[in-house]
Amino acid sequence: MQPELISFKELGDERGALVALEQCHNIPFEIKRVYYIYGTQENVRRGFHAHKELEQVAICVKGGCSFSLDDGKEQAHCRLESPTVGLYMGAMLWHEMYDFTDDCVLMVLASDHYDEADYIRHYDTFIEMVA
Ligand code: T46
């Protein structure tokens, strides 16, 4: 499998850069929630789950971090370190994040409100569900 990366157009001028994110245009779903992760401590890994239905796009708006992805058959890795690149994560994709830079701000756009019932937090359960 290949990570599904989305390139965003940089609308820069002499004052600096600007990126616009629009639901159902360069973000392939209706955005119902935005959250961001920052201040992640050294050597911390986060994630360790898949979502049953949620779709998300993750963007490192500052700094960088790496993703490990697993669809139950294949694994992939990628590093986000540009505010002009997003990682699309559809449903049923096990993901982990690691190697955060000190200054990393990871912004995530999500297709639905927070719902703990949408999380699959045990890898064995995830593998049974995708089999
Ligand atoms: C994901 C990856 C990329 C909320 O109350 N509302 C929210 O919208 C979110 C995202 C989290 N929370 C609470 C739940 C936990 O008590 O915040 C706490 C930390 O969440 P979690 O341990 O799930 O964080 P990560 O970094 O492991 O995962 C997060 C998202 O939860 C998840 O959907 O795909 O980032």
Image: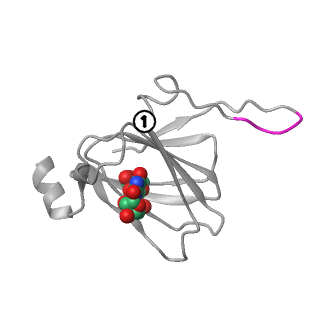
Which amino acid lies under the numbered mark 1 shown in the image of this protein? Lys
Ligand 1's quadrant is bottom left
Give coordinates of residue 22: x percent, y percent. 55, 27
Outermost residue to the right: 14
Disc 1 residue crowd, few under 14, some 14–19, many 20+, Cα 10 Å: few
1 versus 99 height, above or below: above
* Label total for image: 1
- Quadrant assignment, res 3: top left
Locate residue 117, reporting x and y percent: 22, 51
Q: Which residue is mark 1?
A: 32
> Percent from the top left, x then y, of residue 57?
46, 41
Q: Is residue 105 left or right of residue 25?
A: right
Give the prevailing secondary structure in the magenta stretch.
Answer: loop
Q: Nearer the viewer, residue 110 or 57?
A: 110
Q: Residue furthest bottom?
A: 42
Describe the element under mark 1 as helix, strand or loop: loop
**Could you say which quadrant of the image residue 124 lies in?**
bottom left
Instruction: Tell me the magenta residue range.
Output: 14-18
**Which residue is located at x 29 percent, y 49 percent?**
115
Quarter of the N terminus within the rendering: top left
Image vertical order of residue 34 relative to residue 18, above or below: below
